[in-house]
Image (tube, rainbow, N blue to C red):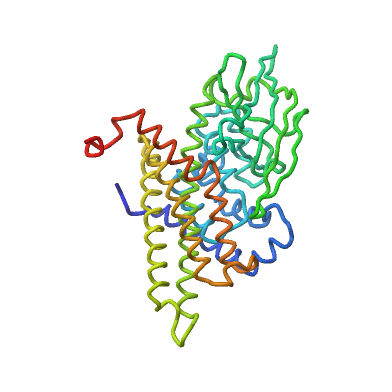
Amino acid sequence: MEFTFTDDQNAIRDLASQIFTDKVTDDYLLNYYKQGRVYDSELWALLAEQGLLGVAVPEALGGSGLGFTELCLLLQEQGRRLAPVPLLSNLVMAALPITRFADDNQAQQWLPSLVRGETMLTAALAELGMTPGIVEPVAARKGSDSWVLSGVLEAVPYAAEAACILLPATDSDGNVSMFLLDTSLDGITVAPQRTSLGEVQATVTLRDVAVANDSVLGAIGQGEEIVAWIEQHANTALAGMQVGVTEEALRRTAAFTAERKQFGAPIGSFQAVAMRAADAYIDVESMRSTFWSALWRLSEGLEAVAEVRAAKYWACAGGHRVVYATQHLHGGMGVDVEYPIHRYFLFAKQLEFMLGGRSVQIARMGQHLAANDDCVPEWMLG
């Protein structure tokens, strides 16, 4: 495994860090959330201008032609500053699978305008984190010259702003296919929702929506494969964002406990506080290690199912422990909803539950290991 970043990767990380650090200050975030905005359109335009929206988009489509590693470095810096822009839904859950599975016409239709910051994309995959019994798949019916989609999609990020939604649908033969849904079509109703963090999601209702045959992403019946591919990359990206969030939350807490005094001494010098912070540090490093393991294997085209589950599990379990500890170590100030550390707590909790929390990840990890003895080390098998 190569642990040294390339010049391009360092440049992407440094540029993203500079933009987010300069723009997304604590005072900015305090005012931003009071305004009830959907996302920061000015910051979004700046990211497009600097070429960051096209990091993992091929050069022929207006992007930089880099890869998933560079994209995760961008997302990690977003997590570090809690920047209110929909990078995950656009660049990971939509643009990546279009780049991987779309034909030339589909890619030309959606990706160049995304890179320019003119169009938004998203994906309807919240059911991956839901109990299977409550999930109602979208039905796809083959017409004479189109597909007809009907059903309800829950918790679709930025659906009201997106020009295209990627969604899986099941036909009468039980085949799952992935569709590129143009949101301007008739029969689509979008009901906005807002999370505790302030991110906008939506319930999208489809009533006999006719989509063209060329709206199928990949091949008919390839939907489950595409969904699994998106899930692996999205979970890894979420783990990267969580590393950024928790690392910064812990850094801020170290600075706070070094200044805050009780009984004439900084509280960071107290054994209980120091041990709590040390445990949080170990969690951050564990999250970082599992994240990079999953990311490297995906970037190298290697089997990474177990590594991705481990990375997302640590992002959930370790992420919760870290932001709980950092909030607790701030004392009463930590529960003030307008104090910066509380926003880190909320952001981390949202990342934790997206696409399934720790119980979902560990259960699916167990299913994978039980079905694939060859991926379990011999010493674990006895």
- The residue closer to the viewer here, 50 or 315, is 315
Q: Is residue 86 above or below residue 182?
A: below
- The residue closer to the viewer here, 314 or 177, is 314
Task: Say left or right for 191 vs 267.
Answer: right
| Residue lying at 36% horizontally and 41% vertically, measured from the top left | 297
Residue at the bottom extreme of this rendering: 264
Task: Say left or right for 213 vs 191.
Answer: left
Task: Say left or right for 40 vs 360.
Answer: right
**Res. 281 image quadrant:** bottom left
Q: Is residue 170 above or below residue 36?
A: above
| Residue lying at 45% horizontally and 55% vertically, measured from the top left | 243
Q: Position of residue 102 (x, y in %)?
A: 55, 29
- The residue closer to the viewer here, 164 or 239, is 239
| Residue lying at 29% horizontally and 35% vertically, measured from the top left | 376
**Res. 133 image quadrant:** top right
Q: Position of residue 380 (x, y in %)?
A: 25, 39
Q: Position of residue 171 (x, y in %)?
A: 61, 18
Q: Position of residue 132 (x, y in %)?
A: 56, 31
Q: Is residue 275 above or below residue 205?
A: below
